[in-house]
Image: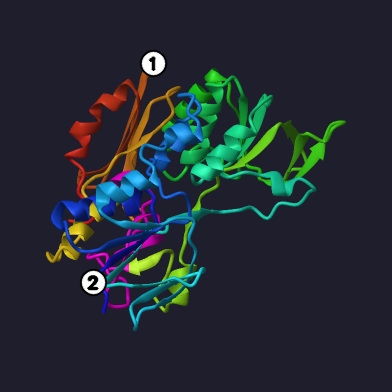
Amino acid sequence: MSASVVILGTGLAGFTLAREFRKLDKDTPLVLVSRDHGGFYSKPMLSNALAGNKTAASLVMKDSDKMVAELNATIHNRATVSRIDTAARTVELADGTRIGYRDLVFAVGADPIRLPLEGDAADTVLSVNDLDDYATFAGRLDGVTSVAILGAGLIGCEFANDLLSRGIVPTVIDLAPRVLPRLLPEAASERLRAKLAEAGAQFRFGVSAVRVDRVGDAGNGLRVTLSDGQALDAGLVLSAIGLRPRTTLAAEAGLQVNRGIVTNRLLAASAGHVHALGDCAEVDGHTLPYVMPIMQQARALAATLAGNPTPVVYPAMPVIVKTPACPTVVCPPPLDASGAWTVELTDDGCDARFHRGDGQLLGFALLGAATKQRQALATQVPGLLV
């Protein structure tokens, strides 16, 4: 039986776990399997890279060779996993390479959810979910003055703000009645929308895109037809309607999957010596596609893999929304929480707090000047997993 720890995925989750593991264990063979170039970059930076004039190449902090040296690891780049045998503890790649493991970790991330669009340009709709996607997106912006963004959630709002930094007018389209409807109370949502609109963003709520067609003499423009029959023209269409955990490979290997790969608080999946973390994982019933949960997971799983079983702990984990037009921090209450929002609006901020009936603070949303309250409020919110 191989003594290797094998990590599938070299995104923020995979590389963070590898680094944390190497702090505790310098010698166990470490193998990473990458769908892409195997270099390290921070995926959260993709949605505000335009403002910093970042190219795909400049976003790479360390290339694959440097990561190999830093981690004392083997990295298989541009590799596809074809089969996993949890009984034999082997991973087989599409090129025939077979890798044995002592422990296997899924850190394979999530895929963009796609709308079933019609039209002769439906295949031109882009999503930005990794560095290669960003390279394609940035390369298509030359000469573009307007972009239609499908989705008014976290990523849609961040890209809208980022496009404004390039002088490109975004039109954000969502079936929901407002921005960040799952994260913000109505008044806070309206404040964020208003600030983005002041900066030049446009919004269409209560409708969805149904088709995308080429228009113009050269066919280089796009027309987005909406569910209410109206249409808008844009130079590019970006889909940002959400992510779906990648579970196909795990399911084919016989692992239990639900919304994500099902794990307990030790991040152990349903087969022995198999774990999952990051956007692909459903940890004790929770799927949290944010940076702070990944950090908590990586530290806990590194300790477990190094011989010290450590359940993951989720303290209050505020999410910073990268919208400089309206700085926003949100610590959403649990989905099943019982309570109510109270909102205080000022000229330069919005302080929204969600309290349980007994007065316990369960979540908050802070905009503008109110974001300075983040640390103080975070200490008052109970952890999700303690």
Q: Position of residue 375 (x, y in %)?
A: 21, 33
Residue 321 falls left or right of residue 305: right
Vertical arrangement, residue 227 with respect to residue 32, above or below? above
Where does the image place residue 369, in percent across and percent down from the top left? 32, 20
Residue neighbourhood size for the residue with mark 2, other residues' Cα within 10 Å, grouped as few (<14), some (14–19), many (≥20): few
What's the distance in space between the residues labelled 2 and 1, CA to CA?
60 Å
Q: Is residue 291 left or right of residue 302?
A: right
CB contact under 8 Å: marks 2 and 1:
no
Is residue 334 visible in the rendered image? The answer is no
Circle 1 is placed at which residue position?
347
> For the residue labelled by badge 2, is the local secondary structure a helix, a strand or a loop?
loop
Q: Residue 272: x percent and y percent? A: 28, 77
Q: Quadrant of residue 7?
A: bottom left
**Amino acid under label 2?**
Ala
Q: Nearer the viewer, residue 71 or 125?
A: 71
**Does the magenta run of residues contain 36?**
no
Magenta highlight: main SS = loop
Residue position marked by numbered label 2 in the rendering:
3
Identify residue type, mark 1: Asp
Residue 1 in percent (x, y) is at 26, 79
Work out whether mark 2 precedes mark 1 in sequence or the reverse, and give the earlier one. 2
Badge 1 marks a residue whose secondary structure is: loop
- Magenta stretch, residue numbers: 263-292
Residue 291 shown in magenta = yes
**Residue at (58%, 25%) from the top-left corner?**
201
Q: Choose mark 2 or mark 1, whichever is in front.
A: 2
